[in-house]
Amino acid sequence: MEVTAISRVFLHKQNGQEVRLTDPGEHLTKEDVRNFYANIYPILTTAKIRGPEFKDDEMQYHFETTMGTKG
């Protein structure tokens, strides 16, 4: 039996490109991670968090924003 560590990765789209954000600390909740990165990417302050999705030995969370859309 082989044990593989699963790392968390946080993703969000910026200018049509998907940006991969590394996990700043396993002890942080997904909301804490969003708040941590909101200092760099202010659009994340109101982002919803979708996930986790397990893909390629990663636990992926997606930050989804609705800013910039009119309707």
Image (cartoon, rainbow, N blue to C red):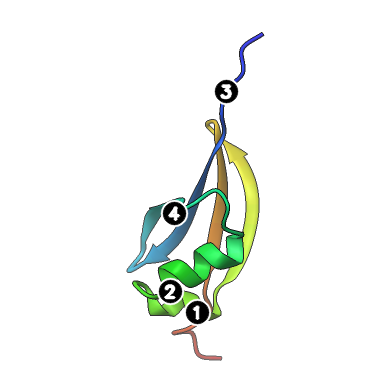
Mark 2 to mark 3 CA distance (whole Å): 30 Å
Of residues 58 and 66, the one nearer the viewer is: 58
Query: Is residue 11 depicted above or below 4 in this figure?
Result: below
Provide the residue designation for mark 1.
Answer: 45
Query: Is residue 63 depicted above or below 22 in this figure?
Result: below
Are the residues tagged 2 and 3 within 8 Å (C-beta)?
no
**SS of the residue under disc 4:** loop
**SS of the residue under disc 2:** helix
Q: Residue furthest front?
A: 27
Mark 4 to mark 1 CA distance (whole Å): 17 Å
Whichever of labels 1 and 3 marks the residue nearer the N terminus, that label is 3
Provide the residue designation for mark 2.
Answer: 38
Label 3: how many residues lie within 10 Å, few (<14), some (14-19) or many (20+)?
few
Provide the residue designation for mark 4.
Answer: 24
Please state which of the two labelled residues, at mark 4 or mark 1, is closer to the viewer: 4
Query: Is residue 54 depicted above or below 39 in this figure?
Result: above
Provide the residue designation for mark 3.
Answer: 4
Whichever of labels 4 and 3 marks the residue nearer the N terminus, that label is 3
Whichever of labels 2 and 3 marks the residue nearer the N terminus, that label is 3
Whichever of labels 4 and 1 marks the residue nearer the N terminus, that label is 4
Pick the quarter of the image with the N terminus: top right
Query: Is residue 35 depicted above or below 46 in this figure?
Result: above
Mark 1 to mark 2 CA distance (whole Å): 5 Å
Q: Quadrant of residue 38?
A: bottom left
Are the residues tagged 1 and 2 within 8 Å (C-beta)?
yes
The three-letter code of the residue at mark 3 reads Thr
